[in-house]
Image: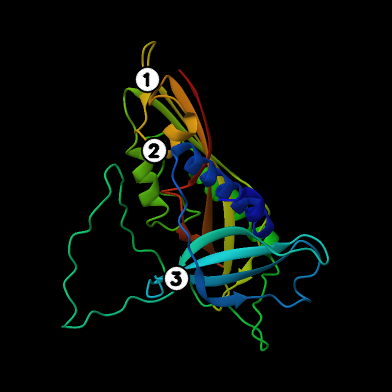
Amino acid sequence: MDDAAQGQVQTGVLLKESLAAYRVHRKAGTKDEVAHLVRPKFLIPSEKADAGFPRFFAVLSKWKGQEKDRSSQLFYFAQTQPGGPWKATASIWALTEPLKKPSATDPAPGPTSTEKGRTIVRMKPKQLPALRRNPDDTVQLSPTGSAERSVCGAFADYLTFDPPQGKLADRRFARGPMTSDLVKFFNGWADPELERSLSYRPAGTALPVLRLDSGSSLVACTLQQTHRVAGVGASGTVVFEKDSDTQIMLGGGPEWREATSISSMTVLLEVPAKAGAAATVLSCDCYDPTLLSATGVR
């Protein structure tokens, strides 16, 4: 939880997320957990393809102690000037291994315990498709990456609404756990005693667009979420759960007239080569974005 040390290895959106998490820990009097990454698989474009600055590479890794988990952590690293340091600028999970078929001797799955006050969302995301590699094992960048990054703004637009007015279907995106199911989840927040709005916008450095074996492209987006909630009427209030990140960031008691929270999240999308075809959201921390700040009115 050393801000200066974190700034030596992270930059951009990822650094903002880490420093915000540190602030919450300090206000709550808690400590961050030590975690280590193992089994790296590097995704490095050729120097010729990655001309100019900022330059990027990415890496898929496992969290130590969770090596058998089907997901991996995907980090994007950036170098902003010749000879400058490489720093992690964005991170998102990705499903990288297929489901293991259970054997007759495997124990039957039991109920999952949940932490009080937490919502557990179960989903079946699509596995990360294979990346197209060159003979020297470097990954290929999409020659149309600038145009394909427009999907970031489209996804921000799709998620911007006042619950319960979110539209589940959108021809720009395939239905699934991080599109139609996510909108349904947010629509469930609607409450006649509260006014609530969600808005999103692309944030941070434009990340590299990688080519997949199928000819589609892998686009990573960092989005900023603004969530406003207010009590209805002259005496209406909003009550936040005690010791929640929002309540801690606001300071003071749990009851407010209105509050606005700013959060950060990263999204990983598969964009088909065919123009107009629906993009698939492969992973997203949309259900649990990282809180950056919160302001309120009593």
- The reply to whether callout 1 and callout 2 are in contact (CB within 8 Å) is no
Residue drawn at x 19%, y 79% as measured from the top left:
106
* Precedes in sequence: disc 1 or disc 2: 1
Residue 254 position within the rendered picture, expressed as x and y whole percent measured from the top left: 38, 26
Residue 168 seen from this side:
no
Residue drawn at x 47%, y 26% as measured from the top left:
259
Dot 3: within a 10 Å radius of its alpha carbon, few (fewer than 14), some, or many (20 or more) residues?
Answer: few
Dot 2: within a 10 Å radius of its alpha carbon, few (fewer than 14), some, or many (20 or more) residues?
Answer: some
Residue type, numbered disc 2: Ser
Residue 194: which quarter of the image?
top left
Q: Which numbered disc covers residue 244?
A: 2
Residue receiving disc 3: 64
> Compared with residue 39, is residue 31 higher up or lower down, i.e. above or below?
above
* Precedes in sequence: disc 3 or disc 2: 3
Residue 134 position within the rendered picture, expressed as x and y whole percent measured from the top left: 66, 84
**Image quadrant in which the C terminus is located:** top left
Front residue of this view, candidates 183 and 233: 233
Residue 264 seen from this side:
yes
Residue drawn at x 33%, y 75% as measured from the top left:
99
